[in-house]
């Protein structure tokens, strides 16, 4: 099992460009999450999906959209990138819609917006 | 604002010593989790403690939870160089499955 995979690993964008960060898990997990991590800020929840076909806002959803394409995949889209979105983005998943499960994290995507 | 806040923000200790870090949170929770992050990598789950538990052990880790004070502590005994990492507490927001992280404690083990 590959666990949680993220693509790309690195990306540089210009202000105003759009892109989609991809996340996939092969553990048959129901819930998936997108976080961003800035220096000194820890992880902040952007969006999450409790199950296929559902999404919900987290702490910092502005400027992002998500799609839960199927049970395996959860993508994060930046429609018009801004320098404030420069960050490391992590995808995570848990087996079910319960907080009593540990989260499994992907390796992260380092995004720089110029 | 974030649900959990770790204290201290950074900690340096000699190898072999014990390391203690604390987490305070704001709302009622049904469990609290601790994660470790090595530099530049994703987070790895360490331990989960339920709201009806006061203490839990896993190897060299000891976690306590005080729901009346809305706080938790993580103790790493007999620290090793490999323990150098950032440690985060995570709690479910509003008792559901939105899991929120604190800002973390950066632990550095000195040789």
Image (cartoon, coloured by chain):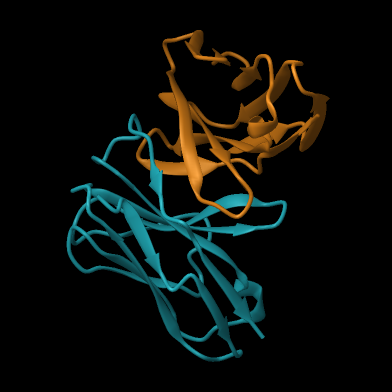
Chain colours: A cyan, B orange
Residue B16, given in percent of the width and then of the height, sits at: 74, 17
Tag count: 0
Give the x, y percent position of residue B4. 60, 36
Q: Is residue B29 visible?
A: no
Q: Is residue B36 above or below residue B42?
A: above
Vertical arrangement, residue B69 with respect to residue A61, above or below = above
Where the C terminus of chain B falls, by quadrant? Answer: top right
Residue at 51% over, 70% down: A62
Q: Quadrant of residue B70?
A: top right
Residue at left offset 24%, top offset 49%: A1
**Position above or below: B8 against A87:** above
Dividing the picture into quadrants, the one containing residue A104 is top left
Farthest front residue?
A: B111
Task: Say above or below: A18 vs A86.
Answer: below
Position in image of residue A88 (x %, y %): 57, 63
* Residue B36 in sight here: yes
Of residues B93 and B7, the one nearer the viewer is B7
**Residue projecting furthest to the top:** B54
Where residue A65 appears, x then y in whole percent?
39, 73
Residue at the image point whose x is 34% and y is 54% from the top: A4
Residue at 23%, 47% (x, y): give it: A29
Seen in the image, is A71 located left or right of residue B35? Answer: left
Specify whether B27 is left or right of B16.
left
């Amino acid at each position: 099992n590959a666990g949680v995979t993220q693509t790309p690993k690195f990306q540089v964008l210009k202000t105003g460009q759009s892109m989609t960060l991809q996340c996939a898990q092969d553990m048959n997990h129901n819930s998936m999450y997108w976080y961003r991590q800035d220096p000194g800020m820890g992880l902040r929840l952007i969006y999450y999906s409790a199950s296929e076909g559902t999404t919900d806002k987290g702490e910092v959803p502005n400027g992002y959209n998500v799609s839960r394409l199927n049970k395996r995949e959860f993508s994060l889209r930046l429609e018009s990138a801004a320098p404030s979105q420069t960050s490391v983005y992590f995808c995570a998943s848990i087996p079910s819609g319960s907080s009593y499960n540990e989260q499994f994290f992907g390796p992260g995507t380092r995004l720089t917006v110029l | 604002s974030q649900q959990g806040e770790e204290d201290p923000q950074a900690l340096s200790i000699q190898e072999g010593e014990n390391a203690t870090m604390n987490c305070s949170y704001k709302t009622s929770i049904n469990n609290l989790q601790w994660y470790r992050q090595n530099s530049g990598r994703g987070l790895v789950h360490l331990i989960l403690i339920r709201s009806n538990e006061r203490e839990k052990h896993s190897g060299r880790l000891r976690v306590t939870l005080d729901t009346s004070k809305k706080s938790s502590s993580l103790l790493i005994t007999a620290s090793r160089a490999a323990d150098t990492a950032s440690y985060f507490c995570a709690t479910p927001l509003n008792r559901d499955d939105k899991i929120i992280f604190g800002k973390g404690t950066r632990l550095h083990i000195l040789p």
